[in-house]
Amino acid sequence: AQSVTQLDSQVPVFEEAPVELRCNYSSSVSVYLFWYVQYPNQGLQLLLKYLSGSTLVKGINGFEAEFNKSQTSFHLRKPSVHISDTAEYFCAVSENDYKLSFGAGTTVTVRA
Amino acid sequence: DTEVTQTPKHLVMGMTNKKSLKCEQHMGHRAMYWYKQKAKKPPELMFVYSYEKLSINESVPSRFSPECPNSSLLNLHLHALQPEDSALYLCASSQEGGGARDSPLHFGNGTRLTVT
């Protein structure tokens, strides 16, 4: 079975500073990788996805992620965060057409 | 604004009650999902409906009973729940063909369920 590991459970960061959230995956076959964000008291929202092609993926709200096959990683980055980026971030890998395996999540807290 | 609407937003029920959670989407999606999310944990898949037929049941206890009356609606019927079933229940949908892989999941804001 495929799985993901999010290496940081909590990431505090100051406003306008860069942030990187780390995600490693395990899979023996082709992978499809996703980052979802969950704002307080809301459902999850897709930030970006990697299916194939360019290893640098750009998503919404200024986020981007880089797929690195040799390091089995899919780290999420944003060059300058806002208070509104405070949320829970989940990395996920697709096991089949309908099932995602989510990582444990990373709580990002942006402080002024 | 979310395109997947869940009602109610909050629900408190006793262990002997029967209640239902409702989910609605009008995006023409043909796959619909129920997830359970405990606090500070990732969502866990419970059920998947594809073209109104149950395609995945992740060994969920029978006290949870899903129903898909049509392509836009998804219900989760609850009966004789336990306090440990208290959680956020999320509904999601995705386009036909590829499901969660080739098309993103669209989540509702969830129903926060408390079982007393």
Image (tube, coloured by chain):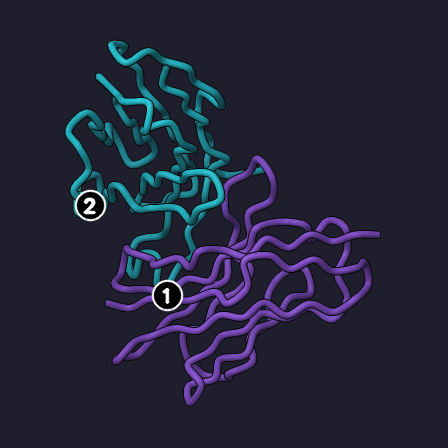
**For this rendering, which residue is in front, A48 or A26?**
A26
Asked which quadrant contains residue A89, the reply is bottom right
What colour is chain B?
A: cyan
In the image, taking residue A6 as reference, residue A79 lies left or right, namely right
Where is the C terminus of chain B found, in terms of image quarters?
A: top left
Per the rendering, the mark at residue A93 is 1
- Residue drawn where x is 47% and y is 31% of the image: B5
Query: What residue is at 24 percent from the left and 41 percent from the top?
Result: B47
In this rendering, position of residue A70 left or right of residue B45: right
Q: Position of residue A41 (x, y in %)?
A: 57, 35
**Marks 1 and 2 share the same chain:** no
Q: Is residue B107 above or below residue B15?
A: below
- The x, y position of residue B21, in whole percent, is 35, 23
Exactly how many numbered labels are in the figure?
Answer: 2
Q: Is residue A47 rendered to the left or right of residue A13? A: left
Q: Please name the residue shown 30% across and 15% down the image.
A: B19
For mark 2, name the chain.
B
Q: Amino acid at mark 1?
A: Val
Q: Secondary structure at mark 2?
A: loop
| Mark 2 residue type | Glu
- Rendered view: A58 above or below A35: below
On-image quarter of the N terminus of chain B: top right
In the rendered image, which quarter is residue B64 located in?
top left
Q: Could you tell me which residue is drawn at 43 percent across and 42 percent down?
A: B27
Chain A: give its colour. Answer: purple
Q: Circle 1 — which element?
A: strand
Label 1 environment density (alpha carbons within 10 Å; few <14, some 14–19, many ≥20): many
Q: CA distance from mark 1 to mark 2?
A: 17 Å
Q: Chain of mark 1?
A: A
- The relative height of residue A6 versus residue B113 in the rendered view (above or below) is below
Residue ID for mark 2:
B58
